[in-house]
Image (tube, rainbow, N blue to C red):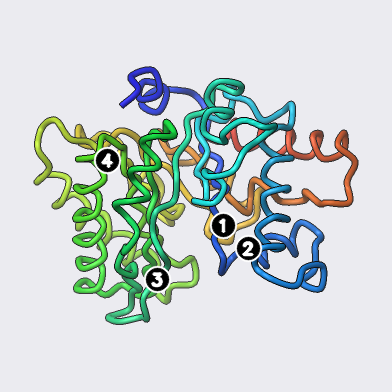
Amino acid sequence: MNDEQRNAMASGRGFIAALDQSGGSTPKALKLYGIEQDAYDNDEQMFNLIHEMRERLMSSPSFTGDKVLATILFEQTMDRAINGEDTAAFLWKQKHIVPFVKVDQGLSEAENGVQLMKPMTKLDSLLERAVDKGIFGTKMRSFIQEPNEAGIKAIVDQQFEYADTIAQRGLMPIVEPEVSINSPDKRKADGLLVAALRTKLDELPADRQVMLKLTLPDEENLYAPLIDHPRVLRVVALSGGYSLTESCEILARNRGLIASFSRALTEGLTAQQTDTEFDEKLGSNIEQIYAASIT
């Protein structure tokens, strides 16, 4: 594991850009970017268009390691190039931004108020490629819809089981058990999740750390015990459907929590903007998220 990258993730000032939309979420991301579904006929064309968007964003002058600590990539983005250079190498060498890759293969059907991750049948080969390409860590997402204690425990158990496999390959796992902002009792679900996470963190060996990516909490500083836990490198927050302004307002009220935003980061960016307009809007979004992350 790269010590310079680890130090940046442990104590750097800034946030994580989540650019890891997969097949299911790509059409919506393109639509928000101003590209309708009739603009492409198949998955290959769709993924080419989303890569063009990501390349435009990552090569933009305002997208630098001064404020963006890391970027989470979709597997295909990791395997492609930015300005003719491998994406992970471009991010670190040209921008000084730490590269991560999303490794989950989507969600299973809901059970006990949650959606576990589907079995990761490609994990070994994906981790091998990630190591070869200089990726620092991984991210995997589960989804919690209801405050069901058994369901939440199953989510956390599965996440930490895969995290162990990932850590053994020398990569830093980001554990992401997202709580729906539309949960019938989100505050209770948040509390149950924190309790389950603390139990698993306490069981980790002394030389092991993970990162946590969690939904912005309803209760201020709910995640303080996780942020301060010796087995946690960093706790980051997802925007989860909140607007950019809402996300930043909530984030700023939580000590030590930094952003890992996707939709909120790209809010207001369109294919129709000139490069100057695009960079000005991206720079404004980055500045807003950065300010909330260092408050």
Along the viewing direction, whichever of 154 and 87 lies nearer the viewer: 87
Whether residue 240 can be seen here: yes
Q: Secondary structure at mark 4?
A: strand
Mark nearest the camera among 2 and 4 is: 2
Q: CA distance from mark 2 to mark 4?
A: 28 Å
Kind of residue indicated by mark 3: Leu
**Vertical side of 2 occupied by 120: above or below:** below
Kind of residue indicated by mark 4: Val
Along the viewing direction, whichever of 101 and 269 lies nearer the viewer: 101
Provide the residue designation for mark 2: 26
Along the viewing direction, whichever of 195 and 95 lies nearer the viewer: 95
Counting residues from the start of the chain, the first of labels 4 and 3 encountered is 3
- Residue placed farthest to the top in the image? 4
Classify mark 3: residues with Cα within 10 Å, few (<14), some (14-19) or many (20+): some
Which quadrant of the figure has residue 57? top right
Provide the residue designation for mark 1: 21
Counting residues from the start of the chain, the first of labels 1 and 2 encountered is 1
Provide the residue designation for mark 3: 107
Counting residues from the start of the chain, the first of labels 3 and 1 encountered is 1
- Residue found at x 57% / y 47%: 77
Which quadrant of the figure has residue 150? bottom left
**Vertical side of 162 occupied by 166: above or below:** above
Callout 1 touching callout 2 (CB < 8 Å): yes
Q: Secondary structure at mark 2?
A: helix
Kind of residue indicated by mark 1: Gln
Q: CA distance from mark 4 to mark 1?
A: 22 Å
Horizontal placement of 50 versus 210: left or right? right
Residue 210's disc is 4
Counting residues from the start of the chain, the first of labels 2 and 4 encountered is 2
Kind of residue indicated by mark 2: Thr
